[in-house]
Image (cartoon, rainbow, N blue to C red):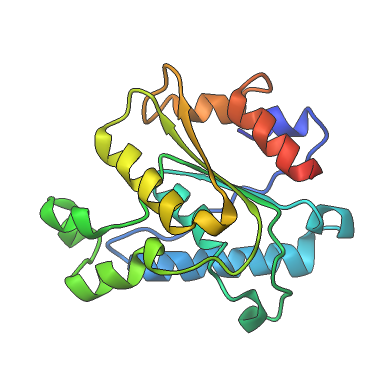
Amino acid sequence: VAEGFVDQGLSVALINYPLCPEVSIGDIRASCAQAFVHLYKSVLSVAERAAIVVTGHSAGGYLAAAHLVESWQNWGLPENLVTGVISLSGVFDVAPLMQTSLKEALCLDRASAAALDLSKEQPRGHAKLALAVGQDESAEFHRQSAALGKSWNALKPEILDIAGANHFTIVDSLASPVGQLNHLAVAMAQR
């Protein structure tokens, strides 16, 4: 994914985070926030700080969107520091996973699932938001993006159906300099 942006003169930071079942989804979200704080305070230049676009795929789509509800002032940062978010095939409401075999591995119970539902939170900033789903993905991924878009309608999110893409190939649209999502990310960075 990085090459498609670096070749266009943009900086890219890829973060890693701990995984379930060693940690909870809430711990993963906090870990990503900590990584973002470190990048912002210690790595990014002033120009890079002015053009932050956060992207993520699947669980990462949730984590990307979570940047819009995080209280960055609690971390010693200014609010409204993200200019754009592109979530690819995001899972924003984990409650449906309670009915699957992933329940145990994700350390989910009713209370934690309810606390993690991004549609129950409101964005703190005014960044551009795109919720992208592959045309060939399951109805649940489409439902999740539509539901978050409706809940966060104040941001006027763009709901994108990426033609011919499935849950895995949707990332190609972000990675390729000719991809629809790549163009969108570059436009968001340039405001």
Which residue is located at x 32 percent, y 29 percent?
137
Which residue is located at x 55 percent, y 58 percent?
154
Q: Position of residue 123 (x, y in %)?
A: 54, 65
Left of 133 or right of it: where is 174? Answer: right
Q: Position of residue 134 (x, y in %)?
A: 41, 28
Quadrant of the snapshot with the C terminus: top right
Q: Position of residue 6 (x, y in %)?
A: 76, 34
> Most extreme residue toward the right, as rendered?
46
Left of 58 or right of it: where is 138? Answer: left
Left of 85 or right of it: where is 63? Answer: left
Which residue is located at x 66 percent, y 69 percent?
37
Q: Is residue 23 visible?
A: no
Q: Is residue 93 above or below residue 143?
A: below
Q: Quadrant of residue 43?
A: bottom right
Q: Quadrant of residue 76?
A: bottom right
Q: Along the line of sight, which residue is nearer the eye, 98 or 30?
A: 98
Q: Position of residue 175 (x, y in %)?
A: 60, 28
Q: Quadrant of residue 95?
A: bottom left
Q: Is residue 119 above or below residue 70?
A: above
Q: Number of numbered discs present?
A: 0
Q: Is residue 56 visible?
A: yes
Quadrant of the snapshot with the N terminus: top right
Left of 49 or right of it: where is 109? Answer: left
Q: Along the line of sight, which residue is nearer the eye, 1 or 184?
A: 184
Which residue is located at x 61 percent, y 22 percent?
179
